[in-house]
Amino acid sequence: MYKDKPEISLEALLAGNQAEFSRMVNTFSGSIYRMAVYMLADTADAEDVLQNTFLKAFQHLKEFEGRSHLSTWLYRIAANEALMMIRKRRPEVSRVDLQNQDQDDHDYTPVQLTDWCCLPEQELLSTESRAVLDQAVQRLPEILRIVFILRDLQGLSIQQTSQVLNLTGSAVKTRLLRARLRLREDLSGYFGQQVTGKAEKGMKHD
């Protein structure tokens, strides 16, 4: 779980300390940028999200009451920026759609699952496999994608993710499960071929 670093002083930020604001930017830029890249699959758009996040943080800093982690507040701004950018790309994706998607697919069950236990870790971490995973993440519906990114890729807790997205903890858990199942089904064919290929190579060497 990502925690705020102790050197970031809210009091100094609220007092307008520019050095402290710069430390905040340096501390959280990397994680926010990665989240935006995962969400948008476009580095230029991710840079816009990053810039707008800290611009809005600077403009609304006095409204931050410290009820959540500073990182949670920044992620909330960044997630909203990324989702707004998606809505600009696809006007049919409305805020209502994003808030009500839990009404869909309650009985969703993956059609095919493959046991990946025998796949070497280095294969899972290969450049090709990473690219396949990134593409599969992009195929997730937006609200499932953002939950998966925040929880599984960025390492936020269920509570932090629920605070970022203004969802209940149970809604986060439901969407996370659905995202994982969809990804597992989507990737089962690819990794199933990897497992089969490894097994066939092993048989040839015997």
Image: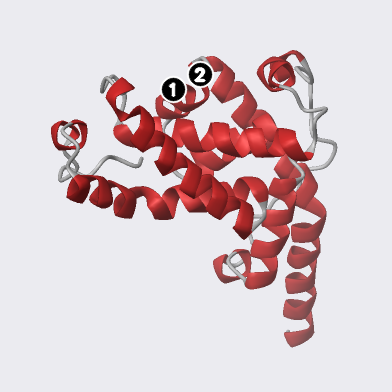
Vertical comparison of 116 with 4: above or below: below
Q: Which mark is residue 117?
A: none
Quarter the C terminus occupies: bottom right
Quarter the N terminus occupies: top left
Q: Is residue 199 visible?
A: yes
Q: Position of residue 182 (x, y in %)?
A: 74, 38
Secondary structure state at the residue bearing disc 1: helix
Q: Residue at x 62, y 71 (%)?
A: 126
Q: Nearer the viewer, residue 12 or 182?
A: 12
Q: Position of residue 35 (x, y in %)?
A: 53, 47
Q: Kindly report the distance in space between the C-alpha atoms of the residues bearing marks 2 and 1.
A: 5 Å
- The kind of residue on which mark 1 rests is Gln
Q: Which mark is residue 163?
A: 1
Q: Which mark is residue 166?
A: 2
Q: Residue at x 64, y 63 (%)?
A: 130
Q: Residue at x 73, y 19 (%)?
A: 101
